[in-house]
Image (cartoon, grey):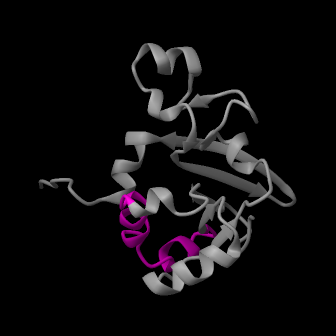
Amino acid sequence: MVTGPEQAPTEVRHSAPAFATAERGQFEELADNIPHLAHLHARDTSLVLVSRASLAKIRPFKARMGWIIPWYSSFGSDFNYDFHVTTDEAVARVEYNYQDKATLERKGESYHLSGEQPGLSVFLRDDNRIFHTYSTYGRGLDAPIGTGHERTA
């Protein structure tokens, strides 16, 4: 999934197998606010989207929305489970936003216990080695979205 410039690919990923979350607007808001990638590419950095949906579902949705950002499918892989953006106790231990199932239940956040969750992860590629350097979830995506934030001088 790491493509493009060699130095430090950044990956934004969102796991929506049938764009269920996209229908609520979260995904569109994130994707609509991704600026032109030329500034990232000038720094040997890439930004891509990854969804658990198949490419057959991703391609028409991407075309309808007019998005040009690279978008890949993790369909049939463990990628989303490995980075805790798809939660299903039958497949993998439930963890979201660095909190285990018991913590999420105690906090009343049962909506994170199954299904698709938003997340952003950053990876560094050094030759053929790839390092996971950062992830953020939930409200950690507010700043990258950029809308609804008052900016003062």
- Residue at horizontal 35 percent and vertical 58 percent from the top: 145
Count up the numbered dots: 0
- Residue at horizontal 74 percent and vertical 61 percent from the top: 75
Q: Nearer the viewer, residue 54 or 47?
A: 54
Instruction: Return the x and y of residue 52 as percentages of the image width and height.
Output: 66, 58
- Residue at horizontal 43 percent and vertical 41 percent from the top: 138
The residue segment tinted magenta is 24-46
Q: Where the N terminus falls, by quadrant?
A: bottom right
Instruction: Return the x and y of residue 44 as percentages of the image width and height.
Output: 64, 70
Relative to residue 70, is residue 23 drawn left or right?
left
Relative to residue 72, is residue 64 drawn left or right?
left
- Residue at horizontal 57 percent and vertical 43 percent from the top: 115
Q: Where the C terminus falls, by quadrant?
A: bottom left
Residue 77 painted magenta: no
Q: Nearer the viewer, residue 37 or 52?
A: 52
- Which residue appears farthest toward the left when viewing the image? 153
Depicted 70 relative to depicted 81: above or below: below
Q: Nearer the viewer, residue 1 or 53?
A: 53
Relative to residue 144, is residue 146 drawn left or right?
left
Instruction: Return the x and y of residue 104 as percentages of the image width and height.
Output: 49, 21
Residue 27 painted magenta: yes
Relative to residue 76, is residue 153 drawn left or right?
left
